[in-house]
Image: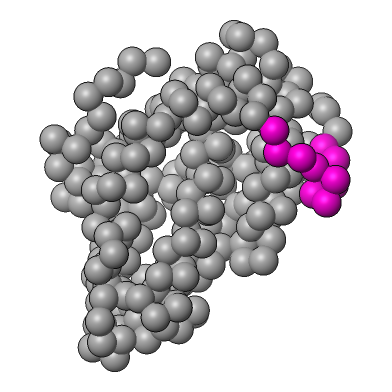
Amino acid sequence: MRNDVPVPPPETQVVRPSAALVALRVGTRERHRTLDTHLPVAQPDATHADYVLHLEALYGWLKPLNDPLWSLPWPEAVRASRRRGKATLIVNDLRRAEAMAFGRPGEPPLCPSVPRCHVLDAYAIGVAYVIEGSQLGGAVLARHFIGGGGGGDSKSDGGGGDARAFSYLVGYGKETGALWRTFIAFVDDAVRSEQDIAHMLRGACDAFDTITAWMITQHLLNEASRPADRDR
């Protein structure tokens, strides 16, 4: 796997269906669909309270994983430092929720079984694909909560359509698209061989499987919602 490849600037990048991307999309489709279909926060009538419960669970999975992952020696153009700090955004939203009488005080429990990424290899890239892809989904949810959704009366619900209450979903803000394209360009250039593609897919599947299992233990998913076919 090559991790020293140059990454073109976002405005010149063309997202193309490389063999690596096709493998990721096809190989994780059912796992992705499970979360999109069954998580309470993804439902059309999701409320701010649902968002807070989701954050409490997500923090436990993301906290031990995200910053160590983006502390690996990624190429400068990937802007790894910009991709760290997601758990801090979750904490900010949870603290704001506590002031609104949502959530529980103290740090949520941490997931004991997250993918271990000690080196920048294809496996770590697969894990990063899942985390960065979730930022695109977060932008969609942000429009729901901030742009008039959020399950009814905003005052009683606590969200109030205030972007400050949803900083994790806002995430990279206007940089979301550019950062995603930069990451995908790196994947295209760095992961070429069949062996690396398979290793990357294993990382992505492990990311989906561990977060799904964690959401089940946190009572946000039920066991029956797991994808039936989990072959890699």
Q: Position of residue 59 (x, y in %)?
A: 38, 54
The residue sitting at 76% across, 20% down in the picture is 2
Task: Please identify the quarter of the rendering in which residue 128 is found.
Answer: top right
Q: Is residue 81 left or right of residue 205?
A: right
Q: Which residues are magenta?
A: 7-16
Does residue 130 sit above or below 158 in this rendering? above
* Quadrant (top left, top right, bottom left, bottom right) of the C terminus: top left
Q: Quadrant of the N terminus?
A: top right
Where residue 137 sits in the image (x, y, percent)? 47, 54
* Image quadrant where residue 145 sits: bottom left
Q: Is residue 152 above or below residue 130?
A: below
* Residue 229 appears in the figure: yes
Kindly identify the residue that appears in the image at 70 percent across and 45 percent down: 181
Position of 89 with respect to 15 (left or right) is: left
Q: Residue sitting at 29 percent across and 91 percent down?
A: 155
- In the picture, measured across the screen, residue 16 lies left or right of residue 220, that is right
Q: Is residue 80 visible?
A: no
Give the tally of numbered discs: 0
Give the quarter of the image for residue 212: top left
- Residue 27 image offset from top left, x and y in percent: 44, 24
